[in-house]
Image: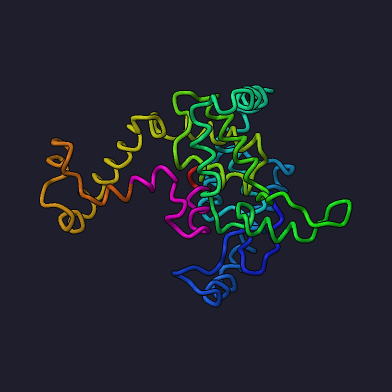
């Protein structure tokens, strides 16, 4: 969605180097990965050409192509279509604008307004679309009509859109309202989708794709996801399981307090859909399959 032009940022606007990887190592990865991306792009272009530039219905071929990775410039379109968000938006014209207007009229009376505001600048601070520093560097090229420098604090390009989508959703879906981690979902979606498309994709994730209750006050859905993960570890990786606890899965589940302490970490995996857990490119490949 956005034009990414900074040398030290990847194609999505995230910093290439981190405490875990050097810039040189990342560039080596890019050299290795680019031919793979080129091959995937060719396959997807052939698929679209065979279907008059339209995304085909779900089938084994589409499933296989998605699992091997969606080209970056098609990712938003593929997510939006196959998630069901496109159909939901088409069936609800004007709904986003209605709830956005309602949220703006409520202002601080919205019980989630303060929480949303506090999380805005915590969302991808190393991404050039959400970074204050990036916004400042962009604004240095501009001047006021009288030739003076702007005095207003520069805003990252995506922050206002992030605020609008989260505020509208908090009114649209009162059973969820706002939950920390939704800001990351919306932030990632905004890198590939337009504003209203992002809203409907968020609604589809929270209301249709994920189990009920993942983002409400009980977070029951997230607890269920964790229980499934722990059961899979117990059944398929028993050696790892018994390094974490001496109880069986069923004993740990029965008393409700003996699940391995690793669940304190893994809960975040399910709430953010692996954002800030896995490398960005890996997260995107997971999301390709998720939708």
In the rendered view, does 23 fall on the left or right side of 176?
Answer: right
Residue 272 inside the magenta-drawn segment? yes
Q: Main secondary structure of the magenta part?
A: helix
Instruction: Give the magenta range.
Output: 267-287
Name the residue: 50% across, 48% down.
287
Position of residue 134 measured from the top left corner of the image (x, y, whole percent): 65, 59
Pick the residue in front: 66 or 146.
Answer: 146
Residue 201 inside the magenta-drawn segment? no
**Quarter residue 243 falls in:** bottom left
Name the residue: 67% across, 52% down.
73
Pick the residue in front: 245 or 144.
Answer: 144
Judged from this view, the residue extending furthest toward the right is 146
Pick the residue in front: 222 or 290.
Answer: 222
In the rendered view, does 62 fall on the left or right side of 45?
Answer: left
**Figure label count:** 0
Name the residue: 52% across, 75% down.
25
Whether residue 9 is situated above or below residue 71 in the rendered picture? below
Which of the colour schemes (rainbow, by chain, secondary structure, one colour) is used? rainbow
Pick the residue in front: 46 or 123.
Answer: 123
Position of residue 29 measured from the top left corner of the image (x, y, whole percent): 54, 71
Whether residue 261 is situated above or below residue 257 in the rendered picture? below
Whether residue 280 is situated above or below residue 16 in the rendered picture? above
Whether residue 209 is situated above or below residue 66 in the rendered picture? above
Position of residue 251 measured from the top left corner of the image (x, y, whole percent): 12, 40
Position of residue 35 measured from the top left corner of the image (x, y, whole percent): 61, 68
């Amino acid at each position: 969605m956005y034009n990414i032009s900074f040398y030290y940022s990847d194609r999505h606007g995230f910093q290439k180097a981190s405490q875990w990887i050097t810039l040189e190592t990342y560039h080596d990865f890019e050299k290795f990965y680019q031919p793979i991306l080129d091959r995937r792009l060719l396959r997807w272009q052939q698929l679209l050409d065979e279907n008059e530039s339209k995304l085909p219905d779900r089938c084994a071929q589409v499933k296989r192509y998605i699992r091997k990775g969606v080209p970056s410039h098609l990712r938003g379109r593929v997510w939006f279509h196959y998630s069901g968000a496109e159909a939901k938006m088409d069936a609800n014209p004007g709904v986003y604008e209605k709830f956005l207007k309602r949220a703006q009229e409520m202002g601080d009376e919205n019980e989630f307004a303060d929480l949303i505001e506090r999380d805005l600048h915590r969302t991808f601070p190393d991404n050039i679309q959400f970074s204050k520093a990036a916004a400042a560097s962009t604004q240095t090229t501009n001047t006021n009509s009288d030739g003076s420098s702007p005095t207003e604090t520069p805003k990252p390009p995506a922050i206002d859109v992030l605020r609008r989508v989260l505020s509208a959703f908090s009114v649209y879906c009162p059973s969820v309202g706002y939950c920390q981690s939704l800001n990351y979902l919306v932030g990632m979606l905004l890198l590939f989708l337009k504003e209203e498309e992002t809203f409907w994709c968020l609604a589809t994730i929270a209301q249709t794709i994920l189990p009920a209750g993942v983002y409400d006050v009980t977070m029951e859905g997230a607890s269920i996801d964790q229980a499934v993960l722990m059961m899979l570890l117990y059944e398929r990786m028993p050696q790892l399981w018994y390094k974490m606890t001496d109880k069986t899965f069923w004993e740990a589940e029965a008393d409700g307090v003996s699940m391995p302490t690793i669940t304190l970490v893994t809960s975040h995996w399910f709430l953010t859909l692996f954002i800030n857990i896995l490398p960005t490119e890996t997260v995107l490949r997971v999301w390709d399959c998720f939708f």
